[in-house]
Every structure is written in C-alpha cells, then in structure tokens.
Image (cartoon, rainbow, N blue to C red):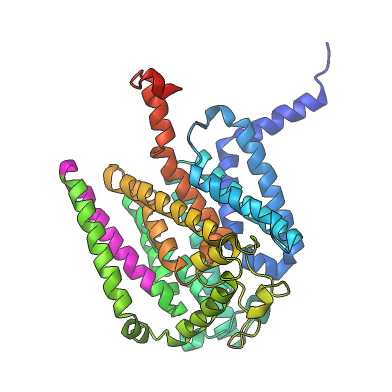
C-alpha cells in the first residue's frame, strides 16, 4: 500500500484549517483587534513587530480567500470607486519625491484594504458586528483598566503609551489609542455596535447593556468635543433611519429628499453658528491648532494642486513637505487632522474628487440599504459611516489602520447588496437587456 505524500497531506490540512468557519471567525476578530491596537503594539514591540503580525495576517487572509474562492460571489463585489482610489494612490509613486516612503505607505494601505475586503467577503453583516463588538469590549475594558492603574494605583503617567494618568481628575483619558479623540471615536463606534447587538439579540441583554454603559463611561472620560459632536450626529441619523424604516415604501423617496434638504439646511446653520458651538464644546484650542495645520497644508497644496505630493499615509516629519509642519503650536502633527485635506495634500485635486466620490457612493448605498431592508443589522454600516465621515472633518483616522479597515468593510458590504454591475448581470441573465446593450 502506497503511503500518502506528506506534502499533499499538509496541503489538505492547511486547506481544511483555512476554510473552516471557526478559523475565519478567529482570524477576523484578530484582524480587527490588531487594527484597533496598532498604536499600542507599535509602542510595545515597535514597527518590526507590528509589521510581522500584519504580514502573517495578510498571508492567512489571502490563503483563506483562495481556499474559499468557490463560495464567494466575485462579480461586482468590489466597488469601482475603491479600485480607482487605490489605483490613483498607487500611481502617485511616479511623481512622488519620496518614492520608497510612498511604496511603504501604499503597502500599508493595501494591507488594511485586504483586511477590510476579507472581513466583508467572508463574514455576514451580523458576524462582522459581533467581531467588532467583541474587540470593542476588550479594548475599552483594557483602556479603563490601564487608566485605573496609571491614574489611581501609581498616580503617574505612562509616557510610552502616551497615557497622562488623569483618571483621578476624571480625564481626559487616552487608553490604548494614544489620544483622547481616537479613544472617543472608538467609544462612539462601540455604542453604535452595541446598540445593533442589543436590537438583533446577538448577545445577552446584560452583556449589551453593560457594554453600552462601558462605552458611554469611556466617552465621558475622554472629554473629547469631536467624539461628543459625532455622537449627537449619529443619534440624529439613527432617529431619521428609524422614521424612514417605518414609512411606507411609496413615501420613502419623498422622505429621503426631504431629509436631504433638511440636512443641508442644518449643516448650513451649524456652519454659520460654528463659533458659539466651538465655545460651548470648549474646543477653541483644538480648532486653532487645526486651522494652523490647514492653512499650512493649503500653502503646500497650491504647489502641486492636481496630482499632490504622493501618498505616504501618516506623515513622516523628516520628509519634505511634512517637515514644514514640525513644531506647529509646540506639536509635531502626523496627519492633516482632516481626511479630505490629507487626501488633497497627498493625492491632489484628482485624488480628492475620487475620494469624495468613493465616500459619497458608499454612504448613499449603505443609507438606502439601511432604510429599505427589514433587518436592523443593515443599519450598522450606515451609522458607522456617519461616525467616520463626521469625524473625518477634524481627524484623518478614517484613512489609516482601523479607520480604513472599517471604511472598506462598510463600503464593500454596501456594494455587495447594491452593485450596478450585479444588477446589470441579473438583467442580462434574465434576457431583459437589448442585444446592442450586451456588447
């Protein structure tokens, strides 16, 4: 009797492992967890350690998608707008004056793009919500624990994690995120996720309520005006979705148009009253800092307005033009503190237009799904995008690491259900298109 070839045995075992639902669940959760904890991991094990973890996850995710390729509907699954944005960012290497840094930035961007695609393709929306919810619970609980250790037990900051140890003064706290705004945004995203878990009964009532209380406590202790403002916006968006979902289908289109008009009017009013609002949220210092960054960024944008300086991701203070931001208001910024300004600086007006189209299409698709689908789980991508887009006006976190992974996941999920290419293919398969349209 011929003994089986060890290579084929190993391949069969690897295929079985990579395709198993339990492995996919574990890998998805670890991907989301590492993405959230990138700052902490860099602080503990440095860039080499973080890149080693990310590289292993990319290999495992790629292998898992290969062995599960037969169960994935690939036609029309990836949004064209996302592909165009990634392509334009990749092309920027040709005119970038820091080509190796651009290559590294593109590899980093593609890494989290792969993670977002993997999460969206191999997990149902409710499974995605559960993965994010589990990670949020762990990270928020860990952040509170380390803040208790620093602010109460040893009453001293932890510099390498940028924890100020001010819990005994009721904040602001930074947790594992390295900045109060980032932890606050995470808390708002967690509140949305925990609410969906509660409504779908995917966790017990006690776990859902306890998780929401934890997220609310963290948000309060961050004392982040940006996160507080985004919470107000997402509550308004959730109320609007609730009304749309209960409306009759034939009335929904008119309600959508009315809601759009109302949003434009409210946004204009908020912009007109921005100074009093900033004073109410006690964010004058933060606004002054951001205005200084935006003014200097605009001076640099004017030098390369169409194509930009080249993609790099988070800024490197030793490279031109980013070194011109060093020491701004006694800080060294690593982003433009505005995702749209960041894209304009790095990818020019062309990249900005592509990015705006990408964000707009993703939001419209997810909003239409949330307002028309029966299951409440479809509201998760729409509300998450509301938070990401709202905070993108004062932070660039949507472009990097966890923010980008989350954005890509929501974008691909929305495109999967509302893809014009899938709709066109369905018409062709049904023989409803004219012969000349099929050419």
Residue located farthest toward the top when viewing the structure as drawn: 1
Which is nearer the eye, 179 or 196?
Answer: 179
Which is nearer the eye, 166 or 337?
Answer: 337
Q: Residue at x 58, y 84 (%)?
A: 164
Which is nearer the eye, 153 or 345?
Answer: 345
**Image coordinates for residue 269, horizontal then vertical, percent:** 26, 74
Asked if residue 201 shows in the view, the reply is no
**Compared to 168, does 22 lie above or below?**
above
- Quadrant of residue 298 within the rendered picture: bottom right
Which is nearer the eye, 233 or 86?
Answer: 86
5 within the magenta span: no
Secondary structure mainly formed by the magenta segment? helix
Numbered circles on residues, count = 0
**For the magenta stretch, what is the residue range?**
229-250
Q: Residue at x 70, y 30 (%)?
A: 13
**Compared to 253, does 191 lie above or below?**
below
Quadrant including the N terminus: top right
Residue 263 lies left or right of residue 311; in this view the side is left
**Image coordinates for residue 206, horizontal then vertical, percent:** 37, 59
**Image coordinates for residue 252, horizontal then vertical, percent:** 20, 47
Asked if residue 257 shows in the view, the reply is yes
**Compared to 345, does 135 lie above or below?**
above
- Quadrant of residue 35 within the rendered picture: bottom right
**Compared to 379, does 386 lie above or below?**
below
Residue 126 lies left or right of residue 403; in this view the side is left
**Image coordinates for residue 189, horizontal then vertical, percent:** 43, 62
Q: Residue at x 56, y 65 (%)?
A: 305
242 within the magenta span: yes
């Amino acid at each position: 009797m011929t003994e089986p070839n060890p290579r084929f045995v190993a391949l069969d075992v690897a295929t079985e492992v990579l395709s198993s639902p339990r492995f996919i669940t574990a890998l998805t959760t670890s991907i989301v967890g590492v993405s959230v904890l990138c700052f902490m991991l860099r602080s503990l094990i440095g860039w080499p350690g973080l890149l080693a973890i990310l590289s292993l996850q990319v290999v495992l995710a790629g292998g898992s998608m290969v062995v599960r390729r037969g169960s994935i509907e690939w036609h029309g699954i990836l949004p064209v707008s996302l592909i165009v944005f990634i392509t334009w960012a990749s092309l920027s290497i040709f005119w970038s004056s820091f080509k190796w840094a651009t290559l590294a930035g593109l590899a980093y961007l593609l890494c989290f793009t792969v993670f977002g695609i993997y999460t969206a393709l191999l997990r149902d929306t409710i499974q995605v919500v559960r993965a994010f919810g589990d990670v949020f619970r762990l990270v928020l609980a860990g952040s509170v624990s380390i803040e208790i250790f620093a602010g109460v037990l040893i009453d001293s900051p932890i510099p390498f994690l940028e924890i100020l140890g001010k819990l005994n003064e009721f904040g602001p706290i930074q947790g594992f995120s390295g900045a109060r705004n980032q932890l606050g945004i995470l808390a708002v995203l967690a509140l949305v996720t925990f609410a969906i878990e509660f409504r779908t009964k995917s966790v017990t009532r006690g776990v859902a309520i306890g998780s929401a209380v934890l997220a609310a406590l963290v948000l309060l202790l961050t004392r982040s005006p940006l996160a507080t403002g985004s919470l107000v916006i997402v509550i308004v968006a959730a109320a609007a979705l609730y009304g749309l979902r209960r409306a009759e289908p034939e009335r929904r289109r008119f309600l959508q148009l009315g809601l759009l008009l109302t949003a434009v009017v409210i946004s204009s009013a908020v912009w007109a009253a921005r100074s009093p609002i900033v004073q109410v949220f006690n964010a004058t210092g933060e606004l002054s800092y951001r205005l200084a960054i935006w003014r200097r960024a605009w001076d640099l944008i004017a030098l390369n307005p169409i194509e930009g300086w080249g993609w790099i991701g988070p800024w490197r203070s030793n490279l031109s033009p980013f070194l011109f931001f060093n020491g701004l208001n006694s800080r060294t910024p690593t982003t433009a503190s505005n995702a749209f300004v960041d894209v304009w600086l790095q990818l020019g007006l062309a990249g900005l237009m592509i990015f705006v189209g990408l964000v707009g299409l993703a939001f419209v698709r997810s909003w239409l799904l949330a307002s028309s689908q029966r299951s409440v789980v479809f509201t998760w991508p729409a509300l998450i995008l509301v938070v990401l887009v709202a905070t993108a006006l004062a932070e660039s976190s949507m472009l990097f690491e966890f923010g980008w992974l989350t954005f890509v996941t929501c974008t691909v999920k929305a495109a999967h259900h509302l893809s014009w290419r899938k709709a066109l293919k369905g018409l062709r398969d049904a023989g409803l298109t004219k012969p000349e349209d099929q050419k």
